[in-house]
Amino acid sequence: MKKGLLGIMGLIGMLAALAVLAGCGKKLEFKYVSETEFLTKPAAAFPEAKFITMSDLHYFDKSLGISGQAYSNYLMEDRKLLTFSGSLLQAAIEIIKQSPATFVIVSGDLTKDGEKGCHEKVAEYLAEIEASGKAVYVIPGNHDINNPDAVSYNGSNTTKVDSINDKEFEQIYGQYGYMEAFNRDTNSLSYAAEPVPGLWLLCIDSTDHQDNYKLGTPVTPGKLTQPELDWIEKILHDAVVNNKAVIAVMHHGAMAHWNGQEQLHPEYIIDDYSDISKMLAAYHVRVVFTGHYHANDITLKRFDNGSFLFDIETGSLVTYPCPIRVVGIGANQKMTVNTLLIKDIPEFDGDLVAYSKKYVTEGLSSLIYHKLKKYGVDDGEAQQITPYVAEAFVMHYAGEDTNAKYEAKIDGLSLWGGIVFNNQKYVIENLRVDLEPTDNDVVLDMKEGAWSAIK
């Protein structure tokens, strides 16, 4: 997820224009639309399985510098617990090693900004998991490859450090999916593996990193190319032929996780998401694990033909509430999803959950306040509006949004303050209203698309 996430008070109409531009370009051609009769075959039953998923580790090696003005300036524009990234990852690994899970999914953004040394350290951490007898499957995120923002910090200065390319990503993480893959896409870092007999893991590279150096910044939006889509549909066709259940994984969301996300933050949902999610469901993919938005949220899309798709988005390990998910699939075709929070790390003496919530709230508040000021809202009104926006995002990150309708209202604003507030209050209101199903602890029916909250 990029550090400019919360530019939510931009010029009126700019976001709508960007959303239109994001949809431009050659339209993807889908093969599933011509396989209607073939796809009437019943969906394969899931085998029993237990696994863990985590996302957006954003690991940063302390040897690259965690003090000085330059590092402080970076943190002021960010909301991640970057200094604790190693301790948080180690704490997650200790939970994983003690769990009955047989494999682990990591859905992208393994590093802060694609630093080669950080990738090599993450691979060492993941080796601990595999040494405990559990397989690990990774995919890249938008921060991980060809990243011109890879730097070290020294006082008030930053120094460029090596990032990695596609081939180096595959080499560093070879034993974490790529060597186990039974099929690889030659046009991307996508692959397919079978962690449990009868269960295929479709790991989709949704990143668009080829022009990062030319642009001078990592590209945040995600997309599929036509060759990659063709490969995906071939794998899914073969899964139907061979009666294999499929779980998909990708960094970018497969659908909107709140009403209005596609307007405000289209870069966090994969391009052509409506068609791609419909394609996945048509091939009997019933669940996709994602990340990118740093929110612990699950949403569900039902299609006219009776198919459905759950998008299980896992929050960032370095952003409140620092979650991982424990997933179990039973013979009854029910998927149980439990959320565990990292509550303690050795280098922090205190209430980590409370601290991380305060940290992200203050970080968001600063970003929101300065955006409001930038667009002409006076100081007093900016201070009035900011808490409403920050609280809504924090609730969404934690999966604590509710089903209750919320009306955002602030009396006494000036004409311009009222225009800005009314133009953007859909963000405040809709972030607080959860789309089905519930987000943190839930049982999902893989046959019917029904769900029930775990009390």
Image (cartoon, grey):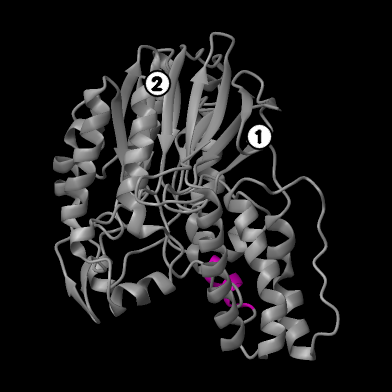
The amino acid marked with disc number 2 is Ala
Circle 1 sits on which residue? 303
Which three-letter amino acid code belongs to the residue tagged 1?
Phe
Question: Label 1 vs label 2: CA separation?
Answer: 32 Å
Which segment did they paint magenta? 13-19
Query: Residue 225 placed where, x, y %?
Result: 35, 49
The image quadrant of residue 299 is top right
Q: Is residue 405 left or right of residue 312?
A: right
Q: Residue at 55%, 45% (x, y): give it.
A: 296
Q: Residues within 10 Å of mark 2 (few under 14, many from 20)?
A: some
Q: Are marks 1 and 2 in contact (CB under 8 Å)?
A: no
In the rendered image, which residue does mark 2 sit on?
101
| Residue 326: assigned label | none
Residue in the image at 55% along x and 38% along y: 311
Dot 1 falls on a residue whose secondary structure is loop
Q: Nearer the viewer, residue 178 or 355?
A: 355
